[in-house]
Amino acid sequence: MYLGKVIGTVWATQKHPSLIGEKLQLVQPIDAGGASVGKPLVAVDTIGAGVGETVMYVTSSEAAIPIKARKRLKLIPTDATIVGIIDRISVQTAPK
């Protein structure tokens, strides 16, 4: 799982039939401190995240699992899926 911040919504008039009814969000990957890491990506939003929220997302073959389970489909063409909204991040450093 990775951390990201939702920075926008993607509107698509044409998309794969398995993605009809699914919301697409633009996500900026971040580190635990909230700093941007890498380039933004498009992720299927399975939980209703909004712009400005910090989220957890999965990639690769794991990205298809939340949609596949809900729609009972075999092939879901997605590379990233939002699976959680993060309320707070607390980072503790180990004592030296």
Image (cartoon, helix red, strand yellow):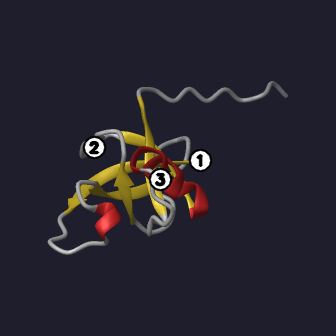
Q: Nearer the viewer, mark 1 or mark 3?
A: 3
Amino acid found under the numbered disc labelled 2: Gly
Q: Amino acid at mark 3?
A: Lys
Up/down of 90 relative to 46, above or below:
above
Label 3 belongs to which residue?
68
Q: Position of residue 85 (x, y in %)?
A: 40, 35
Q: Mark on residue 1?
A: 1
Mark 1, secondary structure of its residue: loop
Reading the chain from its start, which is encountered first: label 1 or label 3? Answer: 1
Residue drawn where x is 34% and y is 63% of the image:
18
Query: To which residue does mark 2 refer?
Result: 52
For the C terminus, the image quarter is top right
Left/right placement of residue 50 relative to residue 62 reads left
- For the point 36% across and 56% down, the residue is 44
The tag earlier along the polypeptide, 2 or 1, is 1
Q: Amino acid at mark 1?
A: Met
Judge whether 93 appears above or below 6 on screen: above
Query: Which residue is painted at 19% across and 69% down in the image?
Result: 12
Q: Label 2: how many residues lie within 10 Å, few (<14), some (14-19) or many (20+)?
A: few
Report how far apart the C-alphas of labels 1 and 3 lie in the structure: 18 Å
Q: Count numbered badges in the picture.
A: 3
Secondary structure at badge 3 equals helix
Per the model, the C-alpha gap separating discs 2 and 1 is: 19 Å
